[in-house]
Amino acid sequence: MQERKKIIVYNEAKLIIISSFISLFCCVLAYSLKLITEYAQHHFREIASSNITWFLLFPTIGITIIYFFRKHLFHNRKNKGIAEIYKTLDLRKDHLPLFKVPSHYINGFFTVIFGGSTGIEVSTVVATATLGNEAYKVDFSAKMYKRELISAAVVAGVAVLFQSPIAGFLFAVEAIARKFNKYLVLSCGASALVAWGFISIFKSESIFPFHVQTWSWQALPFFVMLSLFGSLLSIYFTLLVIKIKEFSLKIRGPYLRLLIGTILIGISLYCFPFLYGDSYHGTNGLLQKIADNSTVSISLLTILVFSKPLVAALTLGAGGDGGVFAPSIVAGAVLGILFAQLSNHYFGTSLIPVNFALAGAAATLSPSISAPFTTFILVCNLVPNGFVLFFPILLSSFIGQKFARFLLPYNVYSYTGRANGKPQD
């Protein structure tokens, strides 16, 4: 009996140690991808702003590069997003091949910097998960810890992207592992601690550098109503991805599929530069205009709410890399701004747009990733003091997720690569 306890303690110690090492490598990977993507996206967006013709051309250049990399460098092996992680966890004989690290890293980078309207979040999640899988394959820890090591890797990637080890921990447990036990706590907890240390050293600004002041309980019914609209927006995004992927598969020939997709993306960027890349910069611009009491067109906001998911779906259908994080956050934030503006104009309310931008982001992201706890923490970290809106964001996360699940049949989620209601792509 004593010998068995020693073995258990020894394996648990190994799990903690290797999870910590995995976390450090994944922090470096996520931080480097975030840093170079932000820098290059800003640079290319400045070029396009000085000559708007580049808005038409950049998506074609970026996705064409990805196509030839995929064909010649990665031997036509496709990336299928988070679905690959679920496959390797549910069918334990399968593994995430190592090429997924450079493939998602490179493809995510080129997609975003050349204007593809997604983000690097899903690319980071799959790349880091692959590193966790590699640690399992080389037998650094007991064979039963595959789920734990992959989850530990994901913790670090999400933590660095959103400057929140808690959000990384919750996403790994809630959306990746889809279960909770002592070993997940040990592996993900160790990874979160390393990520916290890394973030403390390599600090970065919040995605939206606007301070929340306060909120009123009288606004609660408006937060509830916005949450329902946010869940509908998430459904709209999900159905767009399905339909556009179905349509793209009917197009004969990869070059024609790429050409049609990139032309449509280019025209969208030409008309609305806000949609370029992850669009965090454009959302900051909108919030700054509102903070400066400048007028923001209601019709423009309406167009952006519906076009961001559309162009993101077109990017994925054309062969770009990415997922639902950035499009859901941005479209939801713009929806919140639009909702506040309309309410203030037509109903004489005094709703604070930045508050509703965050609530809208939560209501839209939560059903998109099927992780309300993760969404709550993540959205609170989008601004420096987001926890001032603790209750409205928590409420929006849960109402958005529950309402979307009520409206959208599970067979639709299965089609998009989800199992048991969990996002896989």
Image: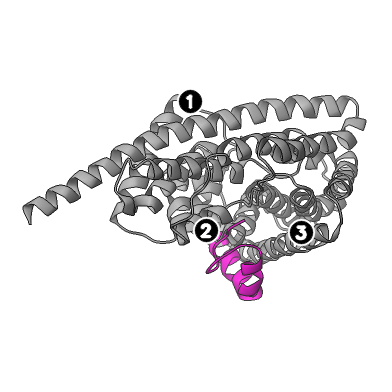
Q: Is residue 304 left or right of residue 77?
A: right
Asked if residue 230 is positioned above or below residue 294 in the image, the reply reads below
- Residue 126 in the image: x percent, y percent? 55, 45
Of the image marks 1 and 2, the number of the one nearer the N terminus: 2
Give the quadrant of the C terminus: bottom right
Q: Residue at x 58, y 38 (%)?
A: 211
Residue found at the far left of this picture: 2
Q: Residue 346: within the magenta?
A: no
Find residue 275 and report its image quarter: top right
Residue designated by label 3: 245
Image disc number at residue 87: 2
Q: Residue at x 43, y 49 (%)?
A: 151
Amino acid type assigned to the residue bearing label 1 in the image = Phe
Residue 284 visible in rendering: no
Q: Earlier in the sequence, mark 3 or mark 1?
A: 1
Left or right position of 94 against 37: left
Is 111 situated left or right of 10 in this image?
Answer: right
Marks 3 and 1 in Cβ contact (< 8 Å)? no
Q: Secondary structure at mark 3?
A: helix
Residue under the image location 69 percent in, 39 percent down: 280
Under circle 2, the secondary element is helix
Query: Image quadrant of residue 398?
Result: bottom right
Lower sequence index among marks 2 and 3: 2
In three-dimensional space, the C-alpha distance between marks 2 and 3, rounded to whole angstroms, equals 20 Å
Q: Position of residue 58 (x, y in %)?
A: 83, 34
Residue 402 x, y percent position in the rendering: 57, 69
Q: Start and end of the magenta stretch?
A: 396-425
